[in-house]
Image (cartoon, helix red, strand yellow):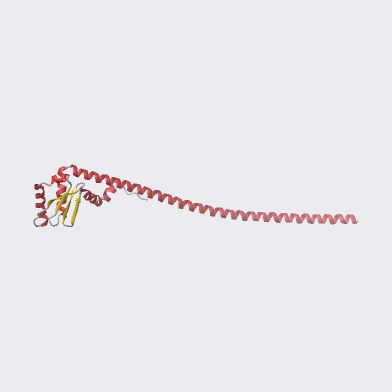
Amino acid sequence: MGMIYMNKVSEKIILEAEKKAEKIEKNASLKAETLSKENKKRLDKIALEYKDKIDRMYLIELNRLKSSAYMEFKKDILREKRKNMEKIHAYLCDYIKNDKELYTKFLKSMALKGTVSGNEKIIVSNNDRTFFTEKFILSINKEAEKKLGHKADLSLSEEVRDTGGGLYLKEKKIEFNATINIVIDTLIEDFEVEIADFLFPVIEQ
């Protein structure tokens, strides 16, 4: 009788232990599942934040590269513009100087444009002195008189300069630069926008 009782007690203890163990295992499983879900949410959040950060960095870098590339492109265009302006400058200088009749008119026009008192000295290069004959200087003075309204007495200076073409007008400390380089530079500057637009259409960013 006592043996039967002991067996029943043992069975009860074992059954209760098994139930407790099952409950513990179930709780542990639920806890693990909850932790797993929380960890997944946390990891997903970190991954999303990291992706957003990467996307922002990518856009910043992409814009930087685009801006840098565009600046280089603009610099290339500017360099090309300068090259073409220099070519135009050289071409116009040569074109005027190589046409004797045109160059004579240019020298006369610049002398008349620069004279203020009518008593200036005309300074030219050694090569251009041959243009300033007595007859040529006389014709300049006649037209200068019409412009100024009084007698003009422009004369060729004994001073010689390497002008590159064109002339200087000088009276005391006042000097007028009418060299061909300055005149062409001014001309190109005045029409730079038109020339640039013709050679290089406007490019939008």
Q: Is residue 200 among what the camera can see?
A: no
Residue drawn at (84%, 55%) of the image:
10
In the rendered structure, the answer to whether residue 69 lies left or right of residue 182 reads right
Q: Residue at x 46, y 53 (%)?
A: 60
For the N terminus, which image quadrant? bottom right
Question: Extreme front residue here?
Answer: 158
**Is 25 or 180 nearer to us in this picture?**
180
Viewer-proximal residue, 130 or 183?
130
Picture coordinates of residue 183, whole percent (x, y): 21, 50
Residue at 78% across, 56% down: 17
In the rendering, at what x and y percent does residue 71 appear?
Answer: 38, 50
Image-based side of 62 in relation to 162, left or right:
right
- Left or right of residue 197, residue 27 in this image: right
Residue 137 placement (x, y as % from top left): 11, 49
Whether residue 51 is visible here, answered yes or no, is: yes
Percent of width and height locating residue 52:
51, 53
* Residue at the farthest right position: 1
- The residue positioned 25% from the left and 45% from the top of the image is 88
Q: Is residue 27 left or right of residue 16?
A: left
Counting the numbered discs, the total is: 0
